[in-house]
Image (spheres, rainbow, N blue to C red):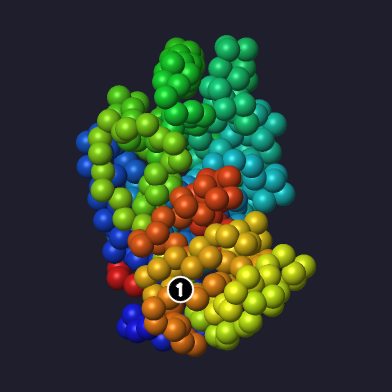
Amino acid sequence: MENQAGTESYFDRSCVEIDLDALKHNFEEIKKATTPGTGILAVVKADAYGHGALETAKTLIDAGAAGLCLATIDEAVELRKHGIDVPMMTLGFTDPSRFKDAVRFEVEQAVYSYEIAEKLSEEAVKAGKTCKIHIKLDTGMGRIGFKTDGTETDEIVKACKLPGLEPYGVFSHFAVADTDDDEYTNRQYELFMKQIGELESKGIHFAKKHICNSAGILRFPNMHLDLVRAGIILYGLMPPGCPEPAVKIDLKPVMNWYAKVIHVKTVPAGTSVSYGRHFKAEKQTEVTTVGIGYADGLSRRLSNGFELIIGGKKCPIIGNICMDMCMVDTTDLEVRPKIGDKVIVFGSQRSADELAEALGTINYEITCDVGKRVRRLYIGG
């Protein structure tokens, strides 16, 4: 079995290869699908869905991203400390104790209650600075946001007029844009625009309006407004179950997850493998041990059946996946594997969607769950 040249010489047991050229390609494809004049915010929260926020942010900024979306103030501060100076916003909760950092590092904040706005205002005034805010409206996600039934309009106006705050943006989030429930998505959009209209009638105007997530970008071009927020599609994956988009784009997986063969042995019939003895060989079996386990993000629920790719062929995992290793049956391979051979978990040769389906989850979780101890190797870019 011949090793593919390149990547495996740079890691000892497991790594994810991040293709920055594929990332840039995906951004260009998204740009084609985005209404001219609409800016693209790159969602790099959760360490860019496991891809590494710093390197992906640099690539996406070079490609033309209008700004970055983060989940936490710490994610934003980390990027600022590494020299990223483009507009950034947090999409959700920031504890008031961290508003000092939000103001200091110029991180635009999601505001979804008057109490939050008031405390953020106090910090901005204290620092003698102005903090840009994005008013978050709950149009049907049921998570966070001001109500859009008109009962909190005056509260939003009051929040936007606080000293030290600039009501720069207003946004909401689609709940089912990646399904065929277009009626609900249209209703969310109508509520969003109606609430903005009510605020404008009271003298509150926003420079940037945004509601489209990845599915919204592809399926509802009439809703692109000033900004769109590209997430999973940046990384070459479609929102699971998403209907045919209005505009077809060519996405390339950015993450390839590899491991290495670390041991090979042949065992006689009746031999048990791994904890619990849940696998017993029915015949003489070639057991290949791979240097990857559940501490690396390979879920233990994939034990006894899910297949890893070795030598271009799918080989079933046998026995329980261990913390740092797992075992696969390579008996049927034509060429015996060798220590150091590359093992493919997912990537360009096999989608992360296969793991998601086997686990009853979504591809977002698969890439996010790749462990921090798994080395990130960046190519291209």
* Quadrant containing the C terminus in the rendered view: bottom left
Q: Residue at x 62, y 62 (%)?
A: 304
> Closest to the observer: 290 or 269?
269
In this view, 34 is above or below 354: above
Q: Which percent across, then down, holds residue 353?
A: 46, 50
Q: Which percent across, then down, holds residue 305?
A: 58, 60
In this view, 60 is above or below 167: below
Horizontal arrangement in the rendering, residue 162 relative to residue 376 (left or right): right
* Quadrant containing the N terminus in the rendered view: bottom left
Specify the quadrant of the image occupied by residue 334. bottom left
Q: Which percent across, then down, holds residue 183?
A: 44, 16
The image shows a total of numbered marks equal to: 1
Specify the quadrant of the image occupied by residue 287. bottom right
> Closest to the observer: 325 or 246?
325
> Closest to the observer: 80 or 365?
365
Horizontal arrangement in the rendering, residue 317 relative to residue 59 (left or right): right
> Closest to the observer: 182 or 260?
260
Say which amino acid is labelled 1.
Asp
- SS of the residue at dot 1? loop
Query: Looking at the image, can residue 372 be seen?
Result: no
Mark 1 highlights which residue?
332
Q: Residue at x 63, y 62 (%)?
A: 303
Task: Characterize the local packing of mark 1: few (<14), some (14-19) or many (20 or more) Cα atoms within 10 angstroms.
Answer: few
Q: Which percent across, then down, holds residue 116?
A: 66, 35
Query: Looking at the image, can residue 197 be seen?
Result: yes
